[in-house]
Amino acid sequence: MPPTLQISALDYSTFVGRIGVGRVNSGTIKPMMDVLVMEGPDGRSYKGRINQVQTFEGLERIASTEAGPGEIVLINGIEGIGIGVTLTDVENPLPLPMLQVDEPTLTMNFCVNNSPLAGREVKFVTSRQIRDRLHKELLTNMALRVHDTGNGDVFDVSGRGELHLGILLENMRREGYELAVGRPRVVKKTINGVECEPYELLTVDVEEDTQGGVMESLGQRKGDLTDMVPDGRGRVRIEYRIPARGLIGFQGEFMNLTRGNGLMSHVFDEYAPVKDGSVAERRNGVLISQDDGAAVAYALWKLQERGRMFVNPGDKLYEGMIIGIHSRENDLVVNPIKGKQLTNVRASGTDEAVRLVPPVQLSLEAAVEFIEEDELVELTPKSIRLRKRYLDHNVRKRFEKVAAAVADD
């Protein structure tokens, strides 16, 4: 049998370049072997030479003199190698069908952080450093797309879903990058003159007593029930066809509805005409700091009746930063740094005790799901903060009036 190796994953090294990872289907793969790189039976092909062959021994990579059928190997030396291509014999080629990489369905704005607290915790903050990191990710992440915008400090990054983009953001945080990101948006296309959006096939496995709440939520998110099968042991598997925008922010809600006992997975289905109506959105407004400074316990105590806090006493705040979730639907500008009024008059009774409710601890995923279009998540290796896109209150009001006028037209 002629040697055949199909690349199913990619890695990158600054020493040897792009590395292909795959399983040997037939024959023997050796270092310094001349191969034909084929993009499926009907695609383009070109000749290349394998430089090194490595195999896995546990988590370690071991140099190998040859690899046979069934072995998972890493090869380098072939420029431009991609997912799904077949490395086969030059004289007797045997190409395998190409693997299909799903197209991106969600996009987010990755922005240079311009808040008053920017640059205090990290070393990678500039647009050039963020751009270089994103383009390095493109070498191995084949489902990712990065596009420059008219603003040199903002990049459009598209991926397969919130988890896909969330992993990239978490990796960048751990590597010492600081940036701000906007709310995820679906990638729409125009097909035959019709505006279309991506649809996902969603499967959830839940307990029967939480089934009603999950189905109600998915119905509000424009999901169409396609199948429901109980297992006879208290659980039920439900399948939906749902717009990708309906899954934005659903992960956290699903975990609450199922008390952490639910399982969910989804795969891309197709692009289809946009479904009328909007999906469920955040019902509450936010509490916004009106000034710069450190949060004061007394001020936070007074604000607790307005909603739940995101910050602790002593945290550094700035104008336009979101410090909590409002108990009502509107946004409210508050002063969380105002201390207690002090006088030289002795109080006749004891002072009121300041008892603070523990603040809501936002994870990266929860923060990205929480924000609206006019808000950003500020990410550093040590902190996750929420803020308004425009920090100045008067500027926000002006943009809100412009947006309202455009909506009326």
Image (tube, rainbow, N blue to C red):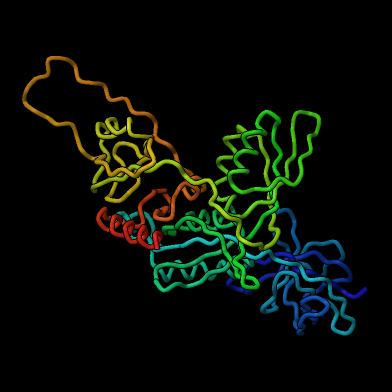
The answer to which quarter of the image holds residue 330 is top left
Residue 50's place in the image compared with 343, above or below, is below
Residue at coordinates 69% horizontally, 77% vertically from top-left?
77
> Taking the image as drawn, is residue 85 in sight?
yes
Residue 160 point in image, percent of width and height: 62, 59
Q: Quadrant of the C terminus?
A: bottom left
In the shown orientation, is residue 32 left or right of residue 316? right
Residue 42 point in image, percent of width and height: 81, 80
Residue 297 point in image, percent of width and height: 27, 33
In the shown orientation, is residue 267 left or right of residue 98? left
For the residue pair 23 and 330, the one nearer the viewer reads as 330
Residue at coordinates 76% horizontally, 63% vertically from top-left?
55
Q: Residue furthest right?
A: 1
For the residue pair 18 and 9, the one nearer the viewer reads as 9
Residue at coordinates 53% horizontally, 56% vertically from top-left?
171
Q: Quadrant of the N terminus?
A: bottom right
Residue 397's place in the image compared with 16, above or below, is above
In the shown orientation, is residue 64 left or right of residue 341? right
